[in-house]
């Protein structure tokens, strides 16, 4: 009987379930958005119960669409938004608070206090990460300090902490687990040993009893006990950006991909040794397949790219659907000298400026909504170039092409401008759902559905290559103006 692989892709704005065949082709897929909750400026939350309901719904929908039953699946993998955290009751399984999303900045004051004492990079040696509100550890500290009874319950192991992979795995299998890629984003795991770091737990005042067990990214974790996937083996766990790296089959040192989603994330495989960044990037676990050594990556994390398009749609109502931004932006020949720096929650790589906030610069009465739409797309490409430059400095490897994936790569205006501003070819793969595909690959490697990574490489195929065509002087002029705009975004939030 023909078998398939399922992947739960729990993202920042939606949850998807996708079924793949052995060639990596999509057999069935379903998606549902969840609410973005903004209790205060800078605070971003999700409802974990809503996400659980949506997960069951999209699984059922995709299986129905593909005329499939759970027993048609060899196994399932999970990929997830990474630094978003939940604290829940071990006995009831109920969340003690809404999930704190990776974009949330409520711990800015805690971050600032640490930085004033010993600098932003004081924990890079242990964790590979700078101090910023982005990561999970200080978010957990906030929950323990602000939810009644949470700290005492966590110390006893009665309140459980997890990123979204842990939350889903717990509800599917009753196991409190995470994988090395997600654990490496908490700022609580030692990047060398792949164990929870006692120094970091002490620094952030985190009780070890609430933490999940760290596993590899690809192994048989257990059998799903409830819901539409009951009886299926759970065999893959990967943070979403690492999953996209796997889905793009970037298994050799120097191979890189960029995912364009709510934010954008450029990862380069650096092999089995961590490379500490001196240019504002992150050192992170890329993946670990079973008992093999973990592979590491350098990452440039950009907080706001697709989320800027959502903001233009929802807050400014410049268009009705995100896809309409391309035709609107294409209606003008250039950006009209408008630049948008979307520092809604500060600027991430390579700047790491908690004090930055969003700006629109260069406005004149000539500017119209089409110029603003074009500037929003171009802001994504400029931010990616910032990261590419930093990655070349850290790795000593000049990018010769860029593999891309994520929802925004369907926007050909953006892809062409990205190639132009980078001055290298930009490659869009035939299968755009590389994040879910990476989770499927991790699961399928664990069960033997796929023999090895060489077999996975045969599945990868390009769909379209965007070749740079911009005059060098124009490229330099535009990029210089971008940097002027970035400088204008700094120092908005005081006392950081």
Image: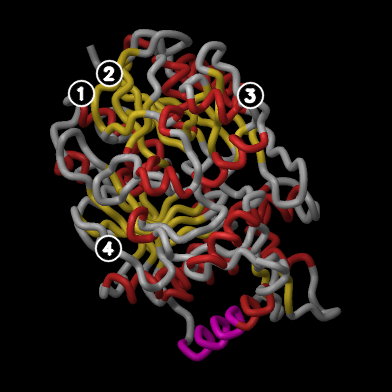
Label at residue 74: 2
| Element marked by disc 4 | loop
Which residue does the image show at 82% across and 79% down from the upper left? 366
Magenta stretch: includes residue 477: yes
Of circles 4 and 3, which is in front?
Answer: 4
The answer to the question of whether label 2 and label 1 lie on touching residues, with beta carbons closer than 8 A, is: yes
Mark nearer the N terminus (1 vs 3): 3
Residue that label 4 marks: 275
Mark nearer the N terminus (2 vs 1): 2
Label at residue 50: 3
Magenta stretch: includes residue 76: no
**Vertically, is 400 above or below 307?**
below
- Distance CA(mark 2)–CA(mark 4): 36 Å
- Pick the front one: 121 or 113: 113
Query: In the drawing, does residue 323 fall left or right of residue 120?
Result: right
- Distance CA(mark 1)–CA(mark 4): 31 Å
Label at residue 447: 1
- Distance CA(mark 4)–CA(mark 3): 38 Å
């Amino acid at each position: 009987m023909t078998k398939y692989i399922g992947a739960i892709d729990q993202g920042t704005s939606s949850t998807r379930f996708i079924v793949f065949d052995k060639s990596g082709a999509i057999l069935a897929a379903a998606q549902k958005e969840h609410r973005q909750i903004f209790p205060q400026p800078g605070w971003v939350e999700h409802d974990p119960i809503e996400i659980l309901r949506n997960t069951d719904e999209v699984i059922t929908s995709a299986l129905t669409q593909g005329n499939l039953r759970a027993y048609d699946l060899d196994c399932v993998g999970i990929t997830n938004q990474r630094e978003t955290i939940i604290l829940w009751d071990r006995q009831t399984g109920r969340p003690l608070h809404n999930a704190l999303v990776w974009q949330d900045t409520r711990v800015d004051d805690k971050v600032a206090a640490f930085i004033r004492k010993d600098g932003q990079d004081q924990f890079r040696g242990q964790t590979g990460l700078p101090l910023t509100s982005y990561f999970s550890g200080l978010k957990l500290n906030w929950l323990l300090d602000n939810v009644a009874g949470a700290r005492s319950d966590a110390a006893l192991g009665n309140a459980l902490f997890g990123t979204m992979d842990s939350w889903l795995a717990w509800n599917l299998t009753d196991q409190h687990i995470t994988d090395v890629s997600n654990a490496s984003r908490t700022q609580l795991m030692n990047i060398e040993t792949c164990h929870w770091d006692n120094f970091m737990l002490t620094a952030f005042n985190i009780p070890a009893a609430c933490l999940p067990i760290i596993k590899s990214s690809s192994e048989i974790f257990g059998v799903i006990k409830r819901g539409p996937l009951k009886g299926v083996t759970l065999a893959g766990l990967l943070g979403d950006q690492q999953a996209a790296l796997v889905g793009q089959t970037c298994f050799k040192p120097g191979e890189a991909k960029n995912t364009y989603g709510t934010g954008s994330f450029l990862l380069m495989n650096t092999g089995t040794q961590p490379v500490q960044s001196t240019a504002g990037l992150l050192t992170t676990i890329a993946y670990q397949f079973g008992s093999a050594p973990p592979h590491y990556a350098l990452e440039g994390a950009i907080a706001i790219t697709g989320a800027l398009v959502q903001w233009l749609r929802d807050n400014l109502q410049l268009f009705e659907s995100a896809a309409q931004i391309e035709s609107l932006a294409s209606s003008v020949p250039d950006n009209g000298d408008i630049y948008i720096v979307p520092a809604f929650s500060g600027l991430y790589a390579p700047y790491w400026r908690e004090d930055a906030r969003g700006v629109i610069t260069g406005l004149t009465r000539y500017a119209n909504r089409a110029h603003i739409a074009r500037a929003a797309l171009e802001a994504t490409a400029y931010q990616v170039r910032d990261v590419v430059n930093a990655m070349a400095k850290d790795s000593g490897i000049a990018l010769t092409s860029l593999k891309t994936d994520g929802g925004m790569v369907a926007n050909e205006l953006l892809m062409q401008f990205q190639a132009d501003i980078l001055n290298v070819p930009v490659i869009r793969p035939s299968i755009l759902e590389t994040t879910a595909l990476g989770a499927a690959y991790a699961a399928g490697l664990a069960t033997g559905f796929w023999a090895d990574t060489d077999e996975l490489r045969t599945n990868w195929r390009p769909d379209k290559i965007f070749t740079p065509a911009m005059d060098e002087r124009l490229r330099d002029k535009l990029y210089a103006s971008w940097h002027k705009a970035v400088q204008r975004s700094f120092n908005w939030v005081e006392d950081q």
